[in-house]
Image (cartoon, grey):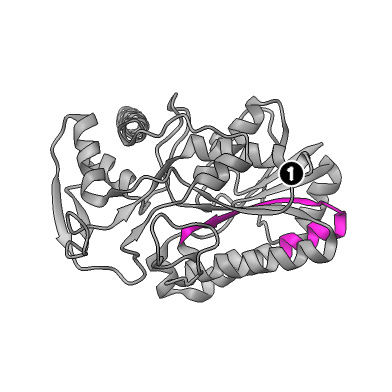
């Protein structure tokens, strides 16, 4: 039996594909490579270049490979961009998932794992935030994901499908062996930006908002290592295969770090100082969001391995240094050719 991973050449998707492949799972990937990289797919894993919303493509892949479960990552994830172009997000996130689910239902695929987000909560009334908290997204990104959660719930009830909705908090870091990581140009992830500054690729790190009512005035986030998150998807698959009921779970550690604390962690592990500039708050940014992670630990066979912020920062830095070495080598080769 095969697992179809949409967006499996992207940041989180590629780590999950690798975790599944290393557990001897049969995996197939659909990715349009808009933000993903074919080189991140392990040797032997089939990659179909196309859109996860292409029902004919999905139908053919399911039929050819005997797909029995889908892990759905494909989508757009940048909050400010979603405010500028909401229709893009409702198309890429909500409409694409509708088409994917339609193909899955037609082929009788009855296990589905969905990549959701803590952005569905908006500014939570309590911290840490539990899964039963009110959902009040502050951006079209969060709204598009929440709409998809509702749609998945309704489809599962109508078609005897079991699902796991995983609400990610702030995903960061890279493969501990630096084989894969976040390589998207112009990525907006805080740790990515900070390690780019630490490696001399950025002049500074902008901190959006220094006047929040938090201990140091900056926003607070719950960072989860991308490899631990990949393991959570593998655990979700085992849970559903074991007959587990449909479930919605937070994916975080339950520990918040401010933006400034996170920048200091990168300075600490790199041993380098880089400039920080304060900028105005951004629309759609939440002040504090930290996961109540008790439910995922109780529900899945999942124990995080990389909870230390310094470890997350060190792995992100090692990956960034590898990327920089490769780009420098390629530039030198081009000059001397």
Q: Is residue 74 left or right of residue 237?
A: left
Q: Is residue 140 above or below residue 248?
A: below
Magenta stretch contains residue 102 = yes
Q: Secondary structure at mark 1?
A: helix
Q: Which residues are magenta?
A: 98-118
Q: Is residue 206 left or right of residue 237?
A: left
The spot of residue 169 in percent (x, y) is 45, 51
Q: Is residue 27 left or right of residue 73?
A: right
The residue beneath circle 1 is 240
Q: Residue at x 74, y 61 (%)?
A: 101
Magenta stretch contains residue 323 = no
The spot of residue 176 in percent (x, y) is 43, 27
Q: Residue at x 43, y 42 (%)?
A: 253
Which quadrant holds the C terminus? top left
Res 277 quadrant in image: bottom left
Q: From where the camera sits, is residue 14 visible?
A: no
Crowdedness near tag 1: few (<14), some (14–19) or many (≥20) residues, C-alpha within 10 Å: many
Q: Residue at x 86, y 47 (%)?
A: 63
Q: Is residue 285 left or right of residue 106?
A: left
Q: From where the camera sits, is residue 243 visible?
A: yes
The spot of residue 290 in percent (x, y) is 39, 53
Which quadrant holds the N terminus? top right
Q: Is residue 122 above or below residue 188?
A: below
Res 287 quadrant in image: bottom left
């Amino acid at each position: 039996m095969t697992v179809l991973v949409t967006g499996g050449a992207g940041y989180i998707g590629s780590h999950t594909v690798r975790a599944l492949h290393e557990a001897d799972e049969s995996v197939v990937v659909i990715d349009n490579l808009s933000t993903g990289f074919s080189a991140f797919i392990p040797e032997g894993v089939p990659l179909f270049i196309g859109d996860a919303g292409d029902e004919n493509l999905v139908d053919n892949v399911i039929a050819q490979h005997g797909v029995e479960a889908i892990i759905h990552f494909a989508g757009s994830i940048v909050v400010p961009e979603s405010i500028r172009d909401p229709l893009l997000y409702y198309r890429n996130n909500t409409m694409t998932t509708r088409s994917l689910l339609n193909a899955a239902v037609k082929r009788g695929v009855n296990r589905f794992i969905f990549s959701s987000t803590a952005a569905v909560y908006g500014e939570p009334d309590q911290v840490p935030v539990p899964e039963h908290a009110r959902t009040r997204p502050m951006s079209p990104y969060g709204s598009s994901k929440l709409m998809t959660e509702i749609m998945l719930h309704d489809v599962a009830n109508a078609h005897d499908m079991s699902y796991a909705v995983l609400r990610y908090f702030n995903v960061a870091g890279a493969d501990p062996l630096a084989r894969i990581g976040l390589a998207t140009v112009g990525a907006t992830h805080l740790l990515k930006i900070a390690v780019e500054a630490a490696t001399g690729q950025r002049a500074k790190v902008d901190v959006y908002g220094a006047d929040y009512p938090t201990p140091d005035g900056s926003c607070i986030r719950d960072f989860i290592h991308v490899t631990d998150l990949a393991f959570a998807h593998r655990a979700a698959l085992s849970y559903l295969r074991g007959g587990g009921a449909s479930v919605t779970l937070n994916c975080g550690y339950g520990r918040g770090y401010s933006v400034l604390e996170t920048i200091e962690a990168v300075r600490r592990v790199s041993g380098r100082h880089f400039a920080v500039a304060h900028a105005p708050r951004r629309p759609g940014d939440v002040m504090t969001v930290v996961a109540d992670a008790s439910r995922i630990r109780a529900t899945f066979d999942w124990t995080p391995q990389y909870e230390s912020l310094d470890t997350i920062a060190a792995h992100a830095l090692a990956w960034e240094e590898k990327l920089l070495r490769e780009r420098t080598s390629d530039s030198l080769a081009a000059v001397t050719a």
